[in-house]
């Protein structure tokens, strides 16, 4: 099977040479390494390729000959998504670099520059005997090359996605090898199964932590769950003797894997699920649970995957309704005795033995303590991730147990540097050339020192590069993609085959797990969002920490202004990345750094839900909610939340901020004579006064507002008089429009936050 997979992966070399228009000698050494198959196995391979060609090239293709292939570019996977009447077609550039890859109009593509030296280096690095090396490098080379066969060039499916699905199908067939089903394939026979899992309780597991060292514990627990899911995936792949080509998607506690439809498949999957849940119960009681099931499918089902995902989703929902078997229920109802008589001060589990720890943590269980200590090992973005099966002679404070699908065979996540060659699996982070399994991970964290994982308090401190302005508040962002489940099931309509589903999953994972790191550094390929349009109040490297960023959702914390600026950059990047075909909604809450993290997460989640309920100009969702939850009066009277905006609508707020900044100054100690001479002094107390007066439509308040504006003293400057009249007219125009009052109120809040002294923080 290994030889067949290698041949399958490398069988398109001649086409790659023609498409990239490069010297054939570059591939000569690699071609010599391709295994020579028997006639029987070649027949099998060709048979599978023919069947997949019929699926991928049945619709949405272009007829080309080999001479003009090199002038074509891969169209965006979102070209056919939710729009079969194509008005504008977007293409991916070939000159790939270390940044976000946006699809562009054909007129914007420009020249494609292939780095031949890098290409040679990548090819020379391929280790035929290392499937992970082969996967990584082939992905780098072929992800933006359209698939071509027999005069037909795929409309929007890359050569990489074809190779991936082809290898997954071949390995699934070959692992259940017998002459009857391997060489006489029936289009309607269910040779395959799509295995899916969903871990419940992730948010409770991450957020239920003590305030001591909260951010380090938060990041470590999130990272631990992320690696746990990858580890479970790889254990299952090893069980079926499959490669990572069979993994369609992983992230956010979910995964999808193509596996062979064996006669004993139901028992195998049940055993795997039970072993993982047995371990969850032992370590975390009922806080975590994995639902797992599969859906059989045939070659014909690959033509439209809508029903596969629909039925599988229903099975997982049913699984969650009846979670545990009889033995597991007995264990839950009769927990192990806690000899220490103290519950864990971090996870609050009372059934596990705890020990009194240092750092004023109190009594803490082993896993929570090791995750707390592991925070310092997460700061280095380049460190590999190690899975070991023997913890002897390893740093006990840098090792955390993982579930295993093999009886009495424990596995551990190790955070240390020296593992003595003890690793059974090594993951690399965001390293596309590494010979290990590469994981895309959103792991950006602002840090004062190279080996430091910053704390909430430190996020609000001044640094040598960044002078924090205004209110000292932690900003918390939670967002996820709108209607993603529906998008996967029916987003491509009649074009919803396995290739486009796989490609969509890959692109979304790439954005939220990899490209998000560039956005945190303001490397977005367009003008960054700047709330106050002033470089003094703009940080290029955002003071934020990504807690988790999965396949479709994000949770991060940071200095409030950086979180706002980042969120609008993220939205714009996502809009460009998906050709404006997908949206997401977000909540941003502001909190004191000592506020319980579980409450931060809960309340920001409620803000996110308010955003998802928003409707503006007949556009549902695609919105952002800010600041704080509505008070009891709003909830009881079903009033619309005043701090919820469609992303485009928020431009009305920034317009007012920019106008006020152009006409006013806010600091009495401003030493600029020109500023004091020509601009209006707009004090914080005056802003509060205006907010109070515009909160009611009472005519007497309008009169009071006119009186307050009239008392502003003139400097006598001609430019001042012009600015004053414009300022006064703007205020009057805004307050006589209910919508404009909403935008003005929010603009004033954001200006107050920038200039307000935070006495509560100082105390």
Image: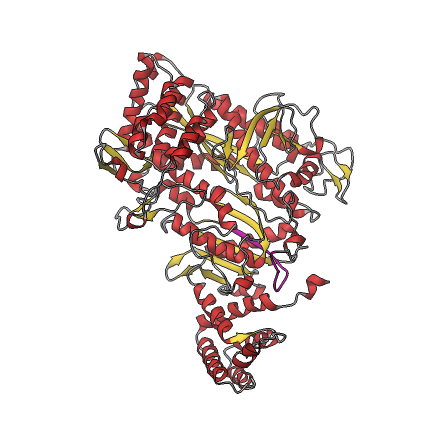
Whether 122 is drawn above or below 704: the answer is: above
Can residue 742 be seen here? The reply is no
Decide whether the magenta segment is chiefly helix, strand or loop: loop
Q: Give the range drawn in magenta.
A: 465-478
Pick whichever, 291 or 331, lies toward us: 291
Residue 337, quarter of the rendered image: top right
Residue pictured at 54% horizontal, 81% vertical: 677
Q: Which residue is drawn at 65% across and 32% down?
A: 416
Location of the N terminus by quadrant is top left
Asked if residue 109 lies left or right of residue 673, the reply is left
Magenta run includes residue 115: no
- Measured as percent of width and height from the top left, residue 675 is found at 55, 77
Quadrant assignment for the C terminus: bottom right
The spot of residue 726 in percent (x, y) is 45, 80
Q: Which colour scheme is used?
A: secondary structure
Number of residue marks: 0
Residue 640 lies, in percent from the top left, at 48, 64
Residue 417 visible: yes
Please identify the quarter of the rendering in which residue 401 is found: top right
For the point 53% across and 75% down, the residue is: 664
Question: Residue placed at 47% from the left, 23% from the top?
Answer: 130
84 or 658: nearer the eye?
A: 658
Q: Where is residue 535 in the image (x, y as percent from the top left)?
A: 52, 62
């Amino acid at each position: 099977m290994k030889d067949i997979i290698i041949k399958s992966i490398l069988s398109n070399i001649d086409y790659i040479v023609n498409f990239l228009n490069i010297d054939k000698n570059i591939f000569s050494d690699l071609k010599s390494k391709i295994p020579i198959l028997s006639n029987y196995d070649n027949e099998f391979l060709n048979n599978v390729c023919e069947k997949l060609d019929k699926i991928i090239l049945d619709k949405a293709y272009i007829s080309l000959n080999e001479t003009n292939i090199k002038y074509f570019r891969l169209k965006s996977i979102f070209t056919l998504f939710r729009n079969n009447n194509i008005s504008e077609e977007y293409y991916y550039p070939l000159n790939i670099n270390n940044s976000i890859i946006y699809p562009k109009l054909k007129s914007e593509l420009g020249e494609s520059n292939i780095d031949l030296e890098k290409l040679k280096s990548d090819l020379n690095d391929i280790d035929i005997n290392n499937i992970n090396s082969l996967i990584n490098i082939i992905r780098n080379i072929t992800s933006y090359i359209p698939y071509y066969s027999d005069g037909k060039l795929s409309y929007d499916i890359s050569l990489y996605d074809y190779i991936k699905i082809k290898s997954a199908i071949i390995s699934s067939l070959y692992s259940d090898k017998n002459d009857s089903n391997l060489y006489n394939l029936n289009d309607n026979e269910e040779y395959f199964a799509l295995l899916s899992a969903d871990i419940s309780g992730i948010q409770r597991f991450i957020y239920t932590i003590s305030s001591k060292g909260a951010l380090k514990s938060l990041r470590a627990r999130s990272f631990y769950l992320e690696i746990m899911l990858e580890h479970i995936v790889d254990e299952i792949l090893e069980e079926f003797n499959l490669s990572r080509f069979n993994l369609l998607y992983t992230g956010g506690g979910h995964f999808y894997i193509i596996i062979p439809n064996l006669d004993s498949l139901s028992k195998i999957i049940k055993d795997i699920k039970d072993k993982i849940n047995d371990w969850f119960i032992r370590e975390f009681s009922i806080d975590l649970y994995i639902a797992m099931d599969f859906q059989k499918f045939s070659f014909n089902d690959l033509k439209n995957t809508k029903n596969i995902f629909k039925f599988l989703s229903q099975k997982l929902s049913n699984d969650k309704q009846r979670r545990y078997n009889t033995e597991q229920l007995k264990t839950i109802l009769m927990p192990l005795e806690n000899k220490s008589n103290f519950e864990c001060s971090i996870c609050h589990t009372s059934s596990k033995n705890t020990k009194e720890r240092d750092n004023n943590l109190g009594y803490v269980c082993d896993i929570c303590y090791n995750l707390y200590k592991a925070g310092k090992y997460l700061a280095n973005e380049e460190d590999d991730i190690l899975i070991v099966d023997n913890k002897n002679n390893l740093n006990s404070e840098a090792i955390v147990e993982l579930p295993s699908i093999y009886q009495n065979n424990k596995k551990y996540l190790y955070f240390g540097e020296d593992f003595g060659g003890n690793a059974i699996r090594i993951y690399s982070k965001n390293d596309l050339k590494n010979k290990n399994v590469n994981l895309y991970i959103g792991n950006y964290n602002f840090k004062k020192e190279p080996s430091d994982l910053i704390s909430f308090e430190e996020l609000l401190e001044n640094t040598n590069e960044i002078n924090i302005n205004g209110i000292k508040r932690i900003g918390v962002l939670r967002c996820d993609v709108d209607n993603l489940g529906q998008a996967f099931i029916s987003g491509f309509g009649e074009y919803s085959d396995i290739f486009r589903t796989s490609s969509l999953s890959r692109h979304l994972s790439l954005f939220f797990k990899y490209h998000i790191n560039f956005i945190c550094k303001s490397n977005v390929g367009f003008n960054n969002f700047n709330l106050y349009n002033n470089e003094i109040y703009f940080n290029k490297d955002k003071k934020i920490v990504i807690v988790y960023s999965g396949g479709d959702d994000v949770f991060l914390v940071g200095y409030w202004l950086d979180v706002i600026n980042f969120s609008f950059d993220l939205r714009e990047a996502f809009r460009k990345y998906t050709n404006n075909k997908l949206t997401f909604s977000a909540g941003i809450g502001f909190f004191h750094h000592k506020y319980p993290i579980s409450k931060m997460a809960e309340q920001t989640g409620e803000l996110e839900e308010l955003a998802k309920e928003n409707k503006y100009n007949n556009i549902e969702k695609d919105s952002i909610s800010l600041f704080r939850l509505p008070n009891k009066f709003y909830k009881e009277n079903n009033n619309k939340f005043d701090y919820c905006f469609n992303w485009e609508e928020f431009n009305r707020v920034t317009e007012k901020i920019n106008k006020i900044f152009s006409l006013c100054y806010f600091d009495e100690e401003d030493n600029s004579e020109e500023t004091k001479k020509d601009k209006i002094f707009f004090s914080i107390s005056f802003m509060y006064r205006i907010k109070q007066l515009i909160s009611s439509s009472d005519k007497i308040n309008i009169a009071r507002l006119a009186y307050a504006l009239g008392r502003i003293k003139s400097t006598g400057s001609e430019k001042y008089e012009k600015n004053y009249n414009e300022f006064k007219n703007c205020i009057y125009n805004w307050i006589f429009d209910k919508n404009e009052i909403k935008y003005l109120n929010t603009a004033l809040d954001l200006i107050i936050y920038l200039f307000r002294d935070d006495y509560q923080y100082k105390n």
